[in-house]
């Protein structure tokens, strides 16, 4: 692919201007891009990986004309946005190459995330939410954003959602001629990659409470091509996938940084605990999966976070994923959060649970009063930490907070969010079979 012009560059904001004011000015008349560190030839600060594009690729009208002239893509829509997925063949002739964006990008790395296709989302989001999306793209927790202008965001291809994988697994569970074993292995192994993204958010002091299976998207990062072939012919799929998936394999990323449920905790709040935030976000993901897709799916994911194999056998230290204790283990994170709070408690006799209630949940005041009050955020977090710090399998996570939040996020009046409840796989299979049959009948109406 030829470069559009030779003066292409990603131009970051001036140092003396805030991100919000800069983005508010640029988003309607310029094209803003955010690309992760792995794409650049040299290490760069996150602020240098978000900027406006120069040349033709920096003209919103150029993107509009190219997208309108491309073949009609597959699409979906909700009450708030429209999403279109353009595959490789729809884009190859015109989509920008690395040097149309910035010559400092690595050609092969840019091709690995762009040649499979792209997703275009039309959503009139506030500037603050767009900034969350751009930041996630630049630090690798969200899909890379090639172009954003006005309500239109052109990002890394969303191959499929975690909800697609879980729904396919449930369909297999309901079909006596299919096996869910391959789905179980994919769900189990991808869980570590998913929660690493949540850990990255927590480390960056971002708390995202709307973490559902719909908000986790798998995006392709093609493998191979190390011989320098820019045409992409030697690149191949890599990552996670499943039988019947709508597109290519991919790696998990986070999307939908809704401002009601996504907040940045200021540095001025000393009580902030990345471990507490990680446990909270992970608990929301697990319990919404439990509520929407059943206990056996959530149990698979919890086993990964507890250091067990897919069948529940505890793994030895050399069998665990890399950096398991500091980044993945939900038990270790909850224990550290409680210990840190207990150590700073004014009264040494105070229990870890009481101390947690006093301080480690204070950072949740960043959420608006209605949200904090409706879901009892602070008091509920203080009770969640001991549950996950314990090795007990008889505790209950069917808390007021998690249950109500799941009902809200899933738009459901009935949810079951207890991760530690026993699972009757045969009963779940019959329920899923009934749902599949009902869906088929409704499709005939």
Image: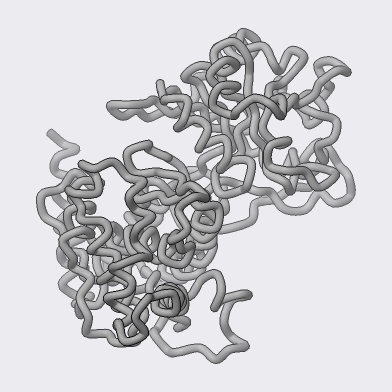
User: Which quarter of the rendered picture does the N terminus lie within?
Assistant: top right
The answer to which of 3 and 331 lies nearer the viewer is: 331
User: Which quarter of the rendered picture does the C terminus lie within?
Assistant: top left
Q: How many marks?
A: 0
Q: Residue at x 47, y 58 (%)?
A: 270
Left or right of 329? Residue 41 is: right
Q: Residue furthest front?
A: 346
> Vertically, is 386 above or below 256?
below
Q: Residue at x 50, y 37 (%)?
A: 132
Q: Position of residue 7 (x, y in %)?
A: 86, 17
Colour mode? one colour
Q: Position of residue 422 (x, y in %)?
A: 20, 80
Residue 215 visible from this viewpoint: yes
Left or right of 307? Residue 431 is: left
Q: Quadrant of residue 196?
A: bottom right
The answer to which of 112 and 358 lies nearer the viewer is: 358
The answer to which of 187 and 330 lies nearer the viewer is: 330
Residue 433 visible from this viewpoint: no
Left or right of 234? Residue 76 is: left
Left or right of 85? Residue 367 is: left
Q: Quadrant of residue 286?
A: bottom left
Q: Residue at x 43, y 61 (%)?
A: 271
Q: Quadrant of residue 193?
A: bottom right
Q: Position of residue 170 (x, y in %)?
A: 29, 61
> Vertically, is 139 above or below 33?
below
> Vertically, is 218 above or below 420?
above
Q: Position of residue 295 (x, y in %)?
A: 25, 69
Q: Residue at x 45, y 48 (%)?
A: 265
> Vertically, is 239 above or below 12?
below
The answer to which of 187 and 71 lies nearer the viewer is: 187
């Amino acid at each position: 692919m030829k470069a559009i012009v030779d003066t292409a560059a990603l131009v970051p904001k001036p140092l003396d201007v805030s991100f919000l004011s800069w983005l508010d000015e640029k988003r309607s008349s310029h094209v803003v891009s955010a690309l992760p560190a792995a794409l650049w030839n040299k290490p760069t600060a996150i602020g240098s990986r978000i900027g406006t594009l120069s040349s033709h690729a920096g003209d919103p009208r150029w993107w509009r004309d190219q997208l309108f002239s491309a073949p009609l893509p597959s699409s979906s829509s909700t009450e708030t946005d429209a999403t279109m997925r353009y595959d490789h063949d729809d884009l190859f002739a015109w989509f920008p190459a690395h040097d149309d964006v910035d010559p400092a990008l690595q050609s092969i790395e840019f091709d690995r995330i762009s040649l499979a296709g792209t997703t275009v989302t039309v959503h009139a989001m506030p500037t603050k939410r767009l900034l969350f999306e751009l930041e996630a793209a630049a630090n690798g927790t969200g899909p890379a954003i090639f172009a954003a202008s006005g309500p239109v965001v052109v990002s890394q291809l969303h191959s499929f959602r975690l909800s697609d994988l879980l729904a396919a697994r449930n369909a297999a569970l309901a079909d006596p001629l299919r096996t869910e074993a391959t789905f179980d292995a994919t769900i189990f192994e991808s869980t570590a990659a998913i929660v690493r993204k949540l850990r990255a958010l927590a480390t960056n002091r971002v708390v995202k409470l709307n973490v559902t299976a719909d908000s986790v998207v798998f995006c392709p990062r093609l493998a191979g091509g190390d011989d320098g072939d820019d045409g992409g012919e030697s690149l191949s799929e890599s990552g996670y996938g499943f039988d019947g998936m709508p597109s290519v394999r991919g790696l998990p990323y986070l999307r939908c940084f809704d401002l009601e449920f996504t907040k940045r905790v200021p540095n001025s709040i000393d009580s902030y605990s990345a471990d507490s935030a990680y446990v909270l976000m992970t608990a929301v993901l697990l319990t919404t999966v439990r509520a929407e897709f059943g206990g056996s799916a959530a149990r698979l994911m919890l086993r990964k976070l507890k250091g067990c194999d897919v069948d529940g056998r505890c793994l030895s230290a050399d069998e665990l994923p890399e950096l398991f204790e500091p980044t993945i283990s939900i038990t270790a994170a909850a224990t550290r959060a409680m210990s840190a709070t207990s150590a700073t408690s004014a009264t040494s006799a105070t229990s870890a649970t009481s101390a947690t209630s006093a301080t480690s949940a204070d950072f949740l005041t960043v959420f608006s009063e209605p949200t904090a009050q409706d879901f009892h955020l602070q008091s509920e977090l203080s009770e969640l930490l001991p549950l996950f710090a314990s090795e007990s399998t008889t505790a209950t996570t069917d808390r007021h907070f998690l249950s109500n939040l799941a009902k809200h996020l899933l738009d459901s009046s009935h949810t079951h969010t207890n991760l530690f409840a026993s699972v009757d796989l045969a009963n779940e299979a019959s329920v899923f079979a009934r749902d599949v049959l009902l869906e088929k009948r409704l499709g005939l109406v």
